[in-house]
Amino acid sequence: MNVTQIYKLLASVTDPEIPVLSILDMGVVRGVEFSEGIVKITITPTYSGCPAMNEIEKNIIETLRLAGVSFVKVNTILSPAWTTDWMTEEGKQKLMEYGIAPPLSPSADKKALMGEVRQVTCPNCKSKHTQMLTLFGSTACKALFKCMDCLEPFDYFKCLR
């Protein structure tokens, strides 16, 4: 077993809240070390107190043990804080296909703070004619939007930086 093989295994560990994304897509895996038969995985939660992190840790250990890795240590670090910049472009595309609008650039969310309209694309019909209904959606890291063209509600994965 080597680090490349371990990353391939980690690509199969999904986010419990968004099962189309791997923990690599999310950018929560910060490092992998393998020495003297021990695999050390370092992860960062999407926000401190994220309830999915215990499940992610359990799934990492289970996935590696099923592949024959006997000793797995998962270390959770809070600094530096996770950012949506760590999400892969492939992960953002998977979000859109799943029905969740991916995070915009940090400057787009900053413009919204200044009263400018945030241009979030509807994942259903691709319209930019959307409106935020509430800052908090199905989880704390999402906001609830509604498309004014197809009238469908959808989650927007907030840009965190």
Image: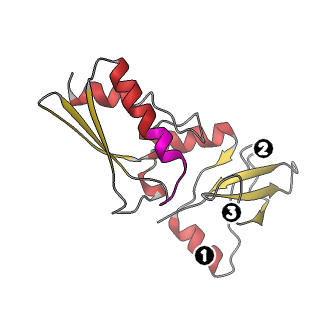
Residue at label 1?
A: 111
Q: Decide whether residue 53 is among the magenta residues.
A: yes
- N-terminal label among 1 and 2: 1
Query: Residue 155's x, y, as percent?
Result: 71, 52
Residue plotted at (87% across, 48% down) = 150
Identify residue type, mark 2: Cys
Residue plotted at (73% across, 47% down) = 126
Cα distance in 3D space between marks 3 and 2: 14 Å
Mark 1 and 2 residues: CB-CB less than 8 Å, in contact?
A: no
Q: Decide whether residue 30 is among the magenta residues.
A: no
Residue at label 3?
A: 119
Residue at label 2?
A: 125
Identify residue type, mark 1: Lys
Q: Which residues are magenta?
A: 48-56
Mark 3 and 2 residues: CB-CB less than 8 Å, in contact?
A: no
Mark 1 and 3 residues: CB-CB less than 8 Å, in contact?
A: no
| Vertical order, 47 against 111 (above or below) | above
Query: Residue 141's x, y, as percent?
Result: 60, 57
Crowdedness of circle 3 by 10 Å Cα count: few (<14), some, many (20+)? some
Cα distance in 3D space between marks 1 and 3: 10 Å
| Badge 1 element | helix
Q: Quadrant of residue 80?
A: bottom left
Position of residue 64 in the picture relative to residue 152 (left or right): left
Observer-nearest of 58 and 126? 58
